[in-house]
């Protein structure tokens, strides 16, 4: 993997051609990047050796998911003590994190609408820091630094239908309620591991402008090396794999009454040093 970027944005120009561009020190919401002209890269993927900055520039017309395709997405459950408490869980009683998968089709861009059908009840949000794999990783050893295998970090929303996540309908498998189409918007950029400290970022989530979640990524119960060691045991994590590291307290299910997402609600997740995603929930007619 030739990691030459600082803040990488994947976008299309007005003609619909897709590029990877360099934002440098710019930290912004996806919508605020529209109209900017930035230098673009040669090559088709940031984890390929021919990925180098060109002498050309292009204007951003639409910001896309920083990952064009994820072989698989993983989530980590109850990875903040406060969220575990509001969910009546005790993750610290186990030495292993609670992990689950999300289907590749759940991947979405930082400004895309998130569709949900009438049967997908109790819709919820989960603002999260995400890790994107950039080099095949298998059997990470205890104490081994995973940084060489990480392409970078991005913002994510682990959208969930709590109705289908509940044990009586899912058999206790979280993936059932979290793998619906476009239930994993991420972006707006992929930030290099050399630029930010993933354990010292500020995360907040709002719904229609109302603050719902706010925390430091330093409060993770299981840190990124621990999660990657667990997930890579006997399994190859391929480039493009997205790991959503867990959500802090304040999900819709925790309120009384619950503040389930409704048709037209706008969820924004922002992480310092990375930027902000903004997605509207849209009921499929």
Image (tube, rainbow, N blue to C red):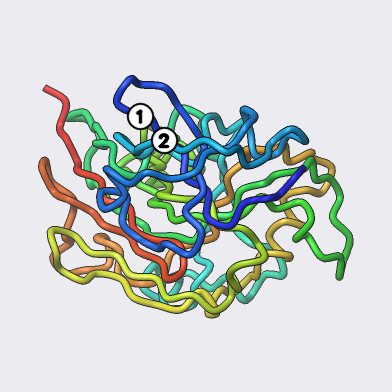
Which of these two is toward me, 47 or 168?
A: 47
Relative placement, left or right, of 163 versus 140 is: left
What kind of element bears circle 2?
strand
Residue 104 position (above or below residue 88): above
Q: Is 184 on the left-hand or right-hand side of 120?
A: right
* Residue at horizontal 79 percent and vertical 56 percent from the top: 148
Q: In which quarter of the image is the C terminus?
A: top left
Residue 13 numbered tag: 1
How far is disc 2 from disc 1 in space, using C-alphas? 7 Å
Taking the view exactly as shown, the residue that stands out farthest to the front is 55
Q: In which quarter of the image is residue 215?
A: bottom left
Q: Where in the figure is residue 205, as x and y percent of width and height?
A: 29, 65
User: Please, what secondary structure does the residue beneath circle 1 have?
Assistant: loop
Would you say residue 178 is visible in this rendering?
yes
Label 2 or label 1, whichever comes before in sequence order? 1
Give the residue displayed 70% in from the left and 53% down from the top: 150
Residue 44 picture location, percent across and down: 62, 28
In front here: 243 or 276? 276
Neighbour tally class for label 1: few under 14, some 14-19, many 20 plus, Cα within 10 Å: some
Residue contact at pointers 2 and 1, CB within 8 angstroms: yes
Q: Residues within 10 Å of mark 2 (few under 14, many from 20)?
A: many
Can the viewer see residue 171 in this picture? Answer: no
**Is 52 situated left or right of 75 in this image?**
right
Above or below: residue 285 compared with residue 279: above
Q: Quadrant of residue 208?
A: bottom left
Residue depicted at 28% across the width and 37% down the height: 112
Q: Can you tell which of label 2 and label 1 is closer to the viewer?
A: 2
The residue that label 2 is drawn on is 58
User: In the drawing, does residue 60 fall left or right of residue 139?
Assistant: left
Q: Position of residue 227 (x, y in %)?
A: 68, 60
Picture disc at residue 92 = none
Q: Could you say where residue 8 lies in the image, as x and y percent from the top left? A: 52, 48
């Amino acid at each position: 993997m030739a990691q030459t970027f600082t803040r990488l944005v994947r976008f299309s120009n007005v003609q619909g051609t897709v590029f990877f561009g360099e934002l440098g020190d710019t930290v912004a919401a996806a919508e605020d990047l529209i109209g900017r002209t930035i230098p673009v890269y040669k090559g088709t993927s940031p984890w390929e050796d021919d990925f180098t900055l060109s002498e050309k520039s292009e204007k951003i017309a639409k910001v896309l998911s920083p990952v064009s395709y994820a072989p698989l997405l993983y989530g980590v459950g109850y990875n903040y003590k406060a969220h575990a408490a509001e969910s009546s869980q005790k993750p610290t009683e186990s030495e292993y994190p609670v992990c689950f998968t999300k289907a590749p089709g759940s991947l979405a861009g930082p400004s895309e609408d998130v569709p949900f059908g009438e049967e997908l009840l109790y819709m919820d949000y989960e603002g999260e820091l995400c890790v994107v794999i950039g080099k095949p990783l298998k059997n990470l050893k205890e104490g081994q630094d995973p940084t060489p295998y990480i392409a970078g970090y991005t913002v994510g929303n682990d959208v969930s239908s709590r109705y289908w996540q509940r044990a009586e309908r899912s058999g206790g498998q979280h993936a059932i309620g979290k793998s619906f189409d476009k239930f994993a918007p991420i972006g707006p950029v992929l930030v290099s591991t050399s630029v930010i400290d993933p354990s010292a970022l500020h995360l907040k989530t709002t719904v229609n402008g109302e603050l719902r979640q706010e925390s430091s990524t330093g409060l993770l119960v299981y840190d990124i090396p621990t999660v990657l060691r667990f997930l890579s045991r006997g399994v190859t994590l391929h480039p493009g794999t997205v790991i959503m590291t867990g959500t802090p307290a304040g999900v819709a299910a925790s309120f009384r009454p619950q503040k389930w997402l409704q048709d037209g609600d706008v969820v924004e997740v922002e992480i310092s040093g990375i930027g902000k995603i903004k997605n509207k929930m849209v009921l499929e007619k």
